[in-house]
């Protein structure tokens, strides 16, 4: 099967990768396209979460990321799939659905609404299969989307208890102006162990003029590429959508025959590494492909793996992983050097602000910016830093302001936690004052832990008081700020701070 789309995506005579939660992420979609799929669907993404996302162009990975306020990447796509990826959302609200569709429409080929998922996480919000009992809402959502976006709009349903009701619902869907409808040939109460009802799909296909995509044939009817056409014929549909068969081995789309699962896993891992896929998602998808071999020696090692580096090593791709990471690091440095504008501070009233995001991995595990600022204040006999933190109601993000010697410092960016917000405020203060902040690789930090100092003074066989009592570690800074004679002020990086002493 091949796509006959010209300009606008066509849903006739195609084989598609079905939307699957945790499976339909970027690496699997790209691999399915490589192996012969004509169209690939994203996993179902909930409209409430997507509506809070920011569209971010990732210059390092060459992707477009939709990032939530907590920095979680909800949806990642790239140019390679742009003309063949369908974004599927879970929604029960026409206005919110439109807002999400307009957010992503320039980066995808079509928009799909999930109206067939029977899982509680979808139905409890009135989404998925819950919509099947509310045709008026179905009509409102699809009509709003068709009128509001420039890309084709589709939906995926399950069959209803009677053939007549199923056909009537499909006809109402068609009248909204959608480009196609996918029909999973099972009731919402049925599971994969139940046989697929091809006669229902066929009845829908005969009643409609738009393409009908048959779904639900994995295992019983479709095991290889040669089974796709017989399934399409049995369902009387325009096209076919595969879920579990493709999850187990996406080379089911391959006209020349299926590949060994070992080769498929290797190719999948390469995409996962190249596009910085979350390691737990990578592991999950590989486990689905291993199936009954998940208890093999490699499968057992996979269970304990925590990173893509470890996963790559298990499957003999350590060299590929290291080479790819080196290439990505070169890109990061280029982006950092050539594209990032210099950090500028702006003072409004008594608050000095910078655009700073606290990235934990960029700092020492032992010393944080807050610790640097605290110890510096002690050395200069200043009052300890005071943090005032606010939280936004719409996304529960945090922003903190630190007061240091009657001056206030704040990042303009909001953080996912109170802890990170305070660290970001401390970073702003330290950068304005020209002080070290504890970044990995930062030279001449001059910060020595109390435990290390006491070890240097104590005999080798004598524990320090801190080791015996487990008391909180203190730190000492060895910085030389400029102090004017006859004055109680400290001048650091051109900023004059008032001290408590005479």
Image (cartoon, rainbow, N blue to C red):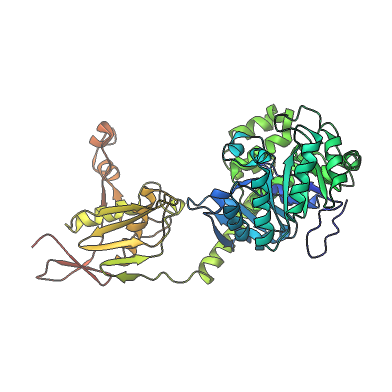
Residue positioned 71% across, 53% down in the render: 86
Q: Does residue 285 appear to the left or right of 344 in the view shown?
A: right
Q: Relative to 243, does residue 394 appear above or below in the rendering?
A: below
Pick the front one: 429 or 450: 429
The location of residue 136, given as percent across then percent down, is 66, 46
Q: Quadrant of the C terminus?
A: bottom left
Q: Nearer the viewer, residue 274 or 16?
A: 16
Q: Residue at x 70, y 33 (%)?
A: 188
Q: Is residue 445 visible?
A: no
Residue 242 in picture, x, y percent from top left: 79, 42
Image spot of residue 394 (x, y percent): 44, 52
In the figure, 349 relative to 257: above or below? below
Q: Quadrant of residue 109?
A: bottom right
Residue 485 visible: yes
> Where does the image place residue 400, in percent across and percent down from the top left?
33, 55
Could you tell whether 498 is left or right of 438 in the image? left
Taking depth in this image into account, of 204 and 107 the one nearest to the observer is: 204
* Closer-to-camera residue (279/333): 279
* Figure disc tally: 0
Asked if residue 267 lies left or right of residue 54, the reply is right
Tell me what residue is drawn at x 54 percent, y 64 percent. 333
């Amino acid at each position: 099967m091949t796509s006959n789309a010209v300009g606008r995506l066509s849903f006739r005579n195609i084989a598609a990768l079905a939307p699957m939660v945790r499976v339909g992420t970027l690496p699997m979609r790209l691999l399915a396209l490589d192996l012969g799929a004509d169209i690939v669907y994203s996993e179902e993404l909930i409209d409430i979460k997507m509506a809070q996302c920011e569209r971010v162009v990732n210059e390092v990975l060459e992707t477009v990321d939709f990032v939530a306020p907590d920095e979680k990447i909800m949806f990642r796509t790239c140019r390679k799939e742009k003309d063949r990826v369908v974004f599927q959302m879970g929604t029960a609200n026409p206005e919110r659905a439109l807002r999400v569709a307009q957010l992503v429409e320039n980066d995808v080929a079509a928009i799909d609404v999930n109206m067939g998922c029977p899982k509680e996480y979808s139905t409890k919000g009135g989404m998925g299969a819950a919509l099947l009992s509310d045709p008026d809402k179905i009509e409102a959502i699809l009509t709003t989307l068709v009128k509001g976006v420039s890309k084709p709009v589709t939906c995926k349903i399950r069959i209803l208890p009677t053939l007549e009701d199923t056909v009537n619902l499909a006809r109402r869907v068609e009248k909204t102006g959608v480009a196609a409808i996918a029909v999973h040939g099972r009731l919402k109460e049925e599971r994969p162990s139940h046989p697929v009802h091809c006669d229902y799909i066929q009845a829908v296909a005969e009643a409609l003029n738009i393409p009908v995509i048959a779904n639900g044939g994995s295992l019983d009817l479709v095991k290889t590429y040669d089974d796709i056409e017989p399934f399409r014929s049995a369902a009387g549909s325009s096209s076919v959508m595969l879920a579990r068969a493709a999850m187990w081995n996406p080379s089911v789309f391959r006209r020349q025959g299926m590949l060994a699962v070992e080769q498929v896993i290797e190719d999948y891992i390469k995409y996962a590494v190249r596009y910085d896929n979350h390691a737990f998602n990578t592991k999950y998808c590989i486990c689905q492909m291993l199936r009954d071999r998940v208890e093999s020696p490699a499968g057992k090692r996979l269970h304990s793996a925590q990173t893509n580096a470890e996963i790559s090593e298990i499957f003999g791709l350590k060299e590929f992983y290291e080479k790819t990471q080196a290439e990505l690091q070169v890109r990061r440095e280029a982006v950092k050097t050539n594209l990032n504008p210099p950090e500028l501070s702006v003072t409004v009233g008594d608050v000095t602000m910078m655009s700073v995001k606290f990235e934990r991995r960029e700092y020492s595990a032992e010393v944080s910016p807050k610790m640097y600022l605290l110890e510096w204040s002690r050395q200069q006999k200043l009052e300890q830093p005071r943090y005032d933190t606010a939280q936004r109601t719409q996304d529960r993000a945090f922003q903190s302001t630190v007061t240091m010697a009657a001056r206030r410092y704040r990042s303009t960016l909001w953080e996912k936690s109170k802890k990170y917000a305070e660290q970001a405020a401390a970073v702003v203060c330290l950068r304005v004052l020209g002080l070290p902040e504890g970044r990995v690789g930062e030279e001449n930090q001059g910060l020595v832990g109390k435990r290390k100092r006491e070890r240097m003074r104590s005999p080798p066989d004598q524990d320090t008081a801190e080791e015996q009592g487990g008391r909180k570690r203190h730190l000492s800074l060895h910085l030389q700020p400029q102090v004017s004679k006859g004055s109680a002020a400290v001048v650091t990086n051109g900023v004059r701070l008032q001290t408590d002493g005479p």
